[in-house]
Amino acid sequence: MRRLRRLAHLVLFCPFSKGLQGRLPGLRVKYVFLVWLGVFAGSWLAYVHYSSYAELCRGHICQVVICDQYRKGIISGSICQDLCHLHQVEWRTCLSSVPGQQVYSGLWQGKEVTIKCGIEESLDSKAGADAAPRRELVLFDKPTRGTSIKEFQEMTLSFLKANLGDLPSLPALAAQVLLMADFNKDHRVSLAEAKSVWALLQRNEFLLLLSLQEKEHASRLLGYCGDLYLTEGVPHSSWPGAVLPPLLRPLLPPALHGALQQWLGPAWPRRAKIAVGLLEFVEELFHGAYGTFYMCETTLANVGYTATYDFRMADLQQVAPEATVRRFLRGRHCEHSSDCTYGRDCRAPCDTLLRQCKGDLVQPNLAKVCELLQDYLLPGAPAGLRAALGKQLRTCTTLSGLASQVEAHHSLVLSHLKTLLWKEISNTKYT
């Protein structure tokens, strides 16, 4: 008993115990502060996530506006009945990256689909309660009542020429637009049908879908109502950051992209098959039936693929017709080449003497795609192929955007790359 008392006396009065007691309040304050900081940071992240989601994901507004116009008889389309009356178009996950272009995964007639709709007019903060009527007056204002079929066809042809160039194939494309407008096959195009198709043509991606509808690497159009349209289901993404929540994606260090690609991406032979499809898509964009197209945002986020690892362009928003890019560059004042940039990476040189943008792009599609494939294909490539593949990709990235050089080298370099990859993966389970 005496020993216990002596031990207690030593513990209570030793200098060490006094120091420990003196530090305890400070430690408690630190822990409370850290807990408060964690709660604050978590609350802030939740608020930012909710705010960004509420801003980006407004599919319900899009559906309300479209169905309002449909019930008024202003617009029409092949899926209007299913969307507005039968409610057979199911909206699922929000995939929007900008507020003005609503993108959702969905389900329609038992098929997975992508739902796309633009609502920038109705989101104008100054519009308030007049948002829907303003959309009616601005977006669905053409053609006007009294326009004949011949006038509408000429109007459509002029629009296609302005955006795709003066090509001999465009009258046939204009005729396809009329056939699409007559979705109920009654051999006449109503004003509502004409207004819907005209509004769709103003959407860059729809114009691209129309121009590339016979190509296997672009998503197939399934139906529309006004300027809302459905395409085939969302392809899988090749970008490793796609597995993260949208709020965390900008925080992903570039150095981790390769590692995530190795851990989470498809096996190398499947990546090679996707890459061959991407190269074929580049080929399709070069001197196709409806002109040449430029890829103006060449990132892995746009490299999609199906369940069988066939390439699908995930987003056509940043693919632009040559005529559109040249019109943007023509006579444009510049101080540096960065002033001559269309989209993210369609860049032309700046003539510093004339202070005007030149017409030819610095890099063609193939050179930009090969830069992308260096990071996508070289990690994990078979040892016997890595040196030859690296050499081919380096040669490809040096291609110039000058028309004369593209004509001379484009097809040859592209053919060598495809042959090299197919030789490695042909006659395997991956093909």
Image (spheres, rainbow, N blue to C red):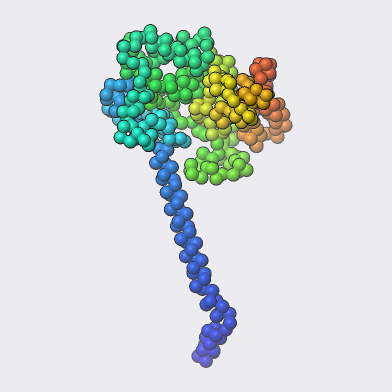
Indicate whether 43 appears above or below 77. below
Q: Position of residue 306 (x, y in %)?
A: 50, 29
Q: Quadrant of residue 230?
A: top left
Q: Quadrant of residue 273?
A: top right
Relative horizontal placement of residue 216, taking residue 131 as reference (left or right): right
Relative horizontal placement of residue 142, taking residue 429 as reference (left or right): left
How many numbered marks does the figure carry? 0
Q: Is residue 189 visible?
A: yes
Residue nearest the observer in this picture, 422 or 333: 333
Indicate whether 388 appears above or below 259. above
Residue shown at the point (48%, 57%) measured from the top left: 38
Q: Quadrant of residue 346?
A: top right
Residue shown at the point (59%, 18%) measured from the top left: 286
Q: Position of residue 7 (x, y in %)?
A: 54, 86
Residue nearest the observer in this picture, 323 or 352: 352
Indicate whether 71 appears above or below 162. below
Residue shown at the point (49%, 68%) measured from the top left: 29
Residue nearest the observer in this picture, 76 or 257: 76
Residue nearest the observer in this picture, 253 or 110: 253
Quadrant housing the C terminus: top right
Q: Position of residue 36 (x, y in %)?
A: 46, 61
- In the displayed orientation, state which residue is furthest to the front: 354
- In the displayed orientation, state which residue is furthest to the bottom: 2
Q: Position of residue 292 (x, y in %)?
A: 56, 18
Residue shown at the point (61%, 20%) measured from the top left: 359
Indicate whether 259 appears above or below 5. above
Q: Is residue 364 visible?
A: no
